Amino acid sequence: MSDALPGDAGYVFVAYMVFLALLLIYLGILGAKFQRINRDIARLGEEVESGREREPAGPAGSPESGSREPTSV
């Protein structure tokens, strides 16, 4: 028996390598997801800002501001 790794140590090493590979794949998927979410948030922020620039600001109680009171009960 002139193995460099005695007994079941080879299997333990392979198991750790598989675990490490799965962990790296998981972290890669998570990183891609966070980048996509960050890009979506930036795009939505730009849309909100461009929407604020286009719409004129009216008086607070005017019907143009979107707050209307019911006319009948």
Image (tube, rainbow, N blue to C red):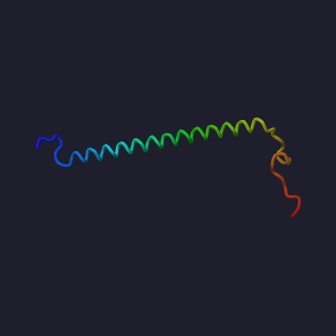
Q: Could you say which is closer to the camera, residue 31 or residue 65?
A: 31
Foreground residue among 61 and 29:
29
- Counting every numbered tag in the picture gives 0
Q: Quadrant of the rendered structure where residue 16 is?
A: top left
Q: Residue at x 81, y 49 (%)?
A: 66
Q: Position of residue 20 (x, y in %)?
A: 35, 43
- Residue 4 in percent (x, y) is at 16, 40
* Residue toward you, 70 or 2: 2
In the image as oriented, which residue stretches furthest toward the right? 71
Q: Nearer the viewer, residue 20 or 67?
A: 20
Q: Is residue 70 above or below residue 63?
A: below
Task: Please give left or right for residue 72 compared with residue 9 in the image.
Answer: right
Query: Quick check: 10 left or right of 47?
Result: left
Residue drawn at x 28%, y 45% is 14
Residue 41 located left or right of residue 30: right
Q: Residue furthest bottom?
A: 73
- Expressed as whole percent of the image width and height from the top left, the position of residue 71 reads 88, 58
Q: Quadrant of residue 49?
A: top right
Quarter the N terminus occupies = top left
Query: Residue placed at 84% from the left, 45% from the top?
Result: 64
Residue located farthest toward the left when viewing the structure as drawn: 1
At 52% across and 41% down in the image, what residue appears? 34
Tell me where residue 41 appears, x and y as whole percent.
61, 41
In the picture, the quarter occupied by the C terminus is: bottom right
